[in-house]
Amino acid sequence: MKVSVDPVLCEANGVCVGVLPDVFDLDDDEVLQVRPGDLAEGEVEPARRAVAACPRNALRLAE
């Protein structure tokens, strides 16, 4: 499973970073960065929480 961000919708609120900092990060320009590749098994549920918590619905999970 992978997570992605729609950069047009993302306001870099950082909610996802607080939920799963090993996958999400804000760079020096306050742009959300998502770690590439598949999520580890233990990251799937926190990623679901991060997607659900996104105030702009900018995050997506895909198989």
Image: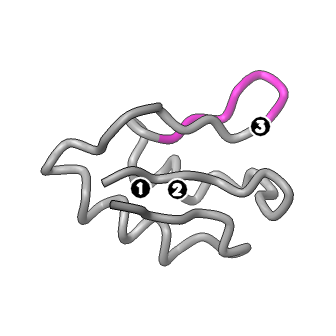
Q: Position of residue 21 (x, y in %)?
A: 43, 40
Q: CA distance from mark 1 to mark 3?
A: 17 Å
* Residue position for label 1: 19
Identified at 51% across, 41% down, the residue is 24
Q: Quadrant of the N terminus?
A: bottom left
Q: Which residue occupies the extreme left position in the image?
A: 41
* Residue position for label 2: 16
Identified at 78% across, 51% down, the residue is 7
Task: Answer with the quarter of the image where residue 49 lies.
Answer: bottom left
Q: Position of residue 55 (x, y in %)?
A: 68, 75
Task: Check if residue 32 falls in the magenta segment.
Answer: no
Identified at 75% across, 51% down, the residue is 12
* Other residues around mark 3 within 10 Å, as few (<14) / some (14–19) / many (≥20): some
Q: Label 2 sits on what residue type? A: Cys
| Badge 2 vs badge 1, beta-carbon distance below 8 Å | yes
Under circle 3, the secondary element is loop
Q: Label 3 sits on what residue type? A: Val
Q: Position of residue 63 (x, y in %)?
A: 33, 60
Q: CA distance from mark 2 to mark 3?
A: 12 Å
Decide: is 57 above or below 50: below
Nearest to viewer (mark 1 / mark 3):
3
Q: CA distance from mark 2 to mark 1?
A: 5 Å
* Other residues around mark 2 within 10 Å, as few (<14) / some (14–19) / many (≥20): many
Q: Which residues are magenta?
A: 24-30
